[in-house]
Image (tube, rainbow, N blue to C red):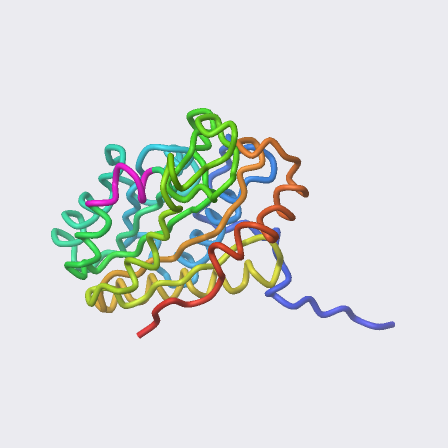
Amino acid sequence: MSTNIIDPDNLVYDKPVIMNDTDMHYCPGCSHGVVHKLIAEVIEEMGLHEKTIGIAPVGCAVFAYNYLDIDWVEAAHGRAPAVATAVKRLNPDKLVFTYQGDGDLAAIGTGETIHAANRGENIAIIFINNAIYGMTGGQMAPTTLLSMKTATTPNGRTIAENGYPLKITDLLAQLPGVCLVTRQSVHTAAAVKKAKRMIRKAFENAMENKGTSVVEIVSTCNAGWKMTPKAANEWMEENMFPAYPLGDLKNI
């Protein structure tokens, strides 16, 4: 009789110990839950459960502290990098990371994000880019694509009225204080593995005081996009990836 040997990498449903049993509030098909699990896995594998401080801002991820059993600090809208700066400087031996959406990081928080990165603060920034304000009704975000319809651009985003989509991670990659900028996704098993590797790299950089690391996750918002989860994934591949190509922008 043959014995099946299970590859540990394929145990995708094994829940990290630091993830709570709280039911998630995210919409079906949302990328947030997958990214939460990856962060939990990396923290657990690095043995940093008691040495991690997450900064949760405003937006869909505002309740991240309900799901990951680590220390959290709640930041005002867009101010997560500023709060993370203080937390890391006061606790240099801790892993400090922010978890932010595009409306938080690339709109109201643009100044805090750019200046924290320019100073080379030893933090990791996890950036969820779904090109829309998901929590507040589906309004246009800085990352909304041209011609993309939202609650505030019902006929589609135009350059004349709304300007170009803001590729904030491309800007951050130019700053000398930034050691890692990578753009990943979690729409397939292979993509999930790559995203996890880069989250771990970002956390390692933060612990080794190499400067600021930014992991952008190109994501879906099927509720805001008004699509099924399957259609949202397909739309992301066809439209988001050409605008926001996956891969490393900077890795030193």
Q: Position of residue 39 (x, y in %)?
A: 43, 53
Residue 23, visible in the rendered structure: no
| Of 85 and 23, the residue lying toward us | 85
Please name the residue shown 51% across and 27% down the image.
154
Q: Quadrant of residue 66?
A: top left
Q: Position of residue 34 (x, y in %)?
A: 53, 48
Seen in the picture, residue 26 relative to 202 is either above or below; the reply is: above
Residue 107 highlighted magenta (yes or no): yes
Q: Residue furthest right?
A: 1
Seen in the picture, residue 168 relative to 132 is either above or below; the reply is: below
Seen in the picture, residue 111 relative to 245 is either above or below; the reply is: above
Indicate left or right for 81 with 166 as reference. left
Q: Quadrant of residue 69?
A: top left
Q: Quadrant of the N terminus?
A: bottom right
The magenta stretch spans which residues? Answer: 104-111
Q: Quadrant of residue 3?
A: bottom right
Indicate left or right for 247 with 90 as reference. right
Q: Quadrant of the C terminus?
A: bottom left
Residue 117 highlighted magenta (yes or no): no
Q: Residue furthest front?
A: 160
Please name the residue shown 47% across and 44% down the image.
145
Q: Position of residue 11 (x, y in %)?
A: 62, 58
Indicate left or right for 12 with 204 as reference. right
Q: Position of residue 174 (x, y in %)?
A: 26, 65
Residue 243, visible in the rendered structure: yes
| Of 127 and 34, the residue lying toward us | 127
Magenta-drawn stretch, dominant element (helix, strand or loop): helix
| Of 140 and 198, the residue lying toward us | 140
Please name the residue shown 43% across and 62% down the image.
45
